[in-house]
Structure formats: C-alpha cells, structure tokens
Image (cartoon, rainbow, N blue to C red):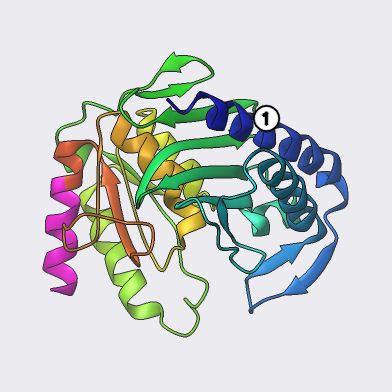
Amino acid sequence: MWQNEFDTAREAARLAGEILLRMSARANLVEKKGAIDLVTEADLRSEETIFELLGRHFPEDGVLSEESAARSGTSGRRWIVDPLDGTVNFAHGFPCWAVSIALESEGEIVLGVVLDPVTGERFEAVRGDGAFLNGDRLSVSSTGDLNDALLCTGFPYDIREEPDRVLRLFEALILRSQGVRRPGSAALDLCHVAAGRADGFWEEKLHPWDTAAGILLVREAGGVVSTFEGGPYRPEDKSLVAGNPSIHRAMVEVISSEIG
C-alpha cells in the first residue's frame, strides 16, 4: 500500500547518508542552538536533499523536520524527518548518527526508515508488515528479567539546568539492570531495541523527528512503546519507554516508583 512512499523514503535516506559521509571529515559548525545543542552545515544539506525528493514526489504532503519550520500540506499526511540524528556525535567524529524519515497518515505512523551511513545498516518498517534490517526481519529480545537487561538512554539538552530527575532515573535503572548505554542517537537506540541488541530504552524531552520512525520499528518488531506513565506514546509526547514486553513493563514500574 505504501510502496511508492517507502521507496522514496529509502532513496532520500540513501542520498542524505552519502552527503553526510562526505561531510563527516569536515563537520563545520553553523550554529549553537544551546549550550550542548548543535546544528552543522551537514544537517542543513541533508535536510535540503530529503526535502527536494519528498517535495518532488509528494508535493501535497506536509513536512515536520528538526532544522526548518513545519510545512503544512493538503493531503492529511506529513513526513517527519531528522536529517542528522546525533549531531553532537557527528560534530566530534564519534560514529553514531543516523538519518530518520517517517510518514504519518491520519495521525498514525505508517512507515519509517532509519539509515546508519557509517555501518550501512538500514532499518525500515511499514505498519502491519514487520520491521527489517537490510532485508532481514527483526524481533525484539526475549530477555525477561530487568536484572539481565541491557538498556539505552539519552539525556535532554537542558540537563545542565535540570539534572536531578534525569540522574535519579539513570541511577535507578542502572542499579536494576545489567548495564546502560548512552550512545547519543535516539533513532538508533530505538532501532537497537527493535533488533534485540538492547532490551529497553527510555528518555525524556524528545521531539517527533527523534522518535517517529524508531517507534514504528519497535512496535513492528514485537516491542512496546509508551510514555513514562505507561500510556500510549505519540511522537509529540515528552517521555518515552520502549522495550520488549517484559522489560518495558519492568522499566515503567521502576520509573513510576521514582517519579510517581
């Protein structure tokens, strides 16, 4: 049903990834949006490439992206784009960053593509058809006990202003799990949950472009995604927990006990 859209998203991610790889050796800082929130020339070039292709194929669709003002459409659909998720990593030469493209139709995410240009891994999902990595079907892990779980998380950009809550949750979950990783790309963290490489993920103050493609991948791989309170997660929500069903449930219980 979404083949044309899916093929276009995949091609847009490929072209953007090629640009980012070429520019990765010279990541020129364009603007500092906050103390630790960056935008580079590469973000803007990647976004421009994605917008051009989406606009050519689907001119009536809206677009929501990290680096530009939202564009309304007339079709009832919108593309949710992160042209470079993990900009701080990219700017420092740390090889953990991605391109994320999702399509929302009638309020539901219907397809998602996340490309890791460094490794060549392409994570993709269409609602109802499963999640895949370079053509191989994905499934979340079978880990059943939080003590045995490997978790991922990220820190919001305002952590310097409000560290207590973030660090309290980090302490609670690192002490109850086998380990916690903080790679720096929420899109890839969600993909790793979908692939069973990580058992769970949590973070606050994310944006739709950080999560839209990744949450579909987790769900299509058999995982669960919710808010910290355990309610249904939508890309506009400000807290997110994802994992296989057992680990997700355990993480929500820990988070609820810590923050009420």
Residue 65 visible at all: yes
Is 89 situated left or right of 6 in this image?
A: right
Q: Residue at x 13, y 47 (%)?
A: 249
Residue 198 visible at all: no
**Which image quarter holds the C terminus?**
bottom left
Residue 175 at x, y percent in the picture: 24, 55
Q: Residue at x 66, y 64 (%)?
A: 67
Amino acid type shown at disc 1: Glu
**Which of these two is toward me, 117 or 216?**
216
The image quarter containing residue 163 is bottom left
**Does 61 sit above or below residue 193?**
below
Question: Residue lying furthest bottom in this view?
Answer: 161
**Which image quarter holds the N terminus?**
top left
Residue 98 at x, y percent in the picture: 61, 43
Name the magenta segment's main secondary structure: helix
Is 14 situated left or right of 192 in this image?
A: right
Residue 124 at x, y percent in the picture: 48, 29
**Which of these two is toward me, 88 or 51?**
51
Q: Which residue is mark 1?
A: 11
User: Within the magenta stretch, is there residue 257?
Assistant: yes
Is 109 situated left or right of 11 in this image?
A: left
Question: Which residues, given as a range, are shown in magenta?
Answer: 249-260
Residue 182 at x, y percent in the picture: 47, 52
Question: Residue lying furthest top in this view?
Answer: 136
Q: Residue at x 64, y 78 (%)?
A: 34
Which secondary structure, mark 1? Answer: helix
**Which of these two is toward me, 68 or 91?**
68
Q: Residue at x 18, y 73 (%)?
A: 259
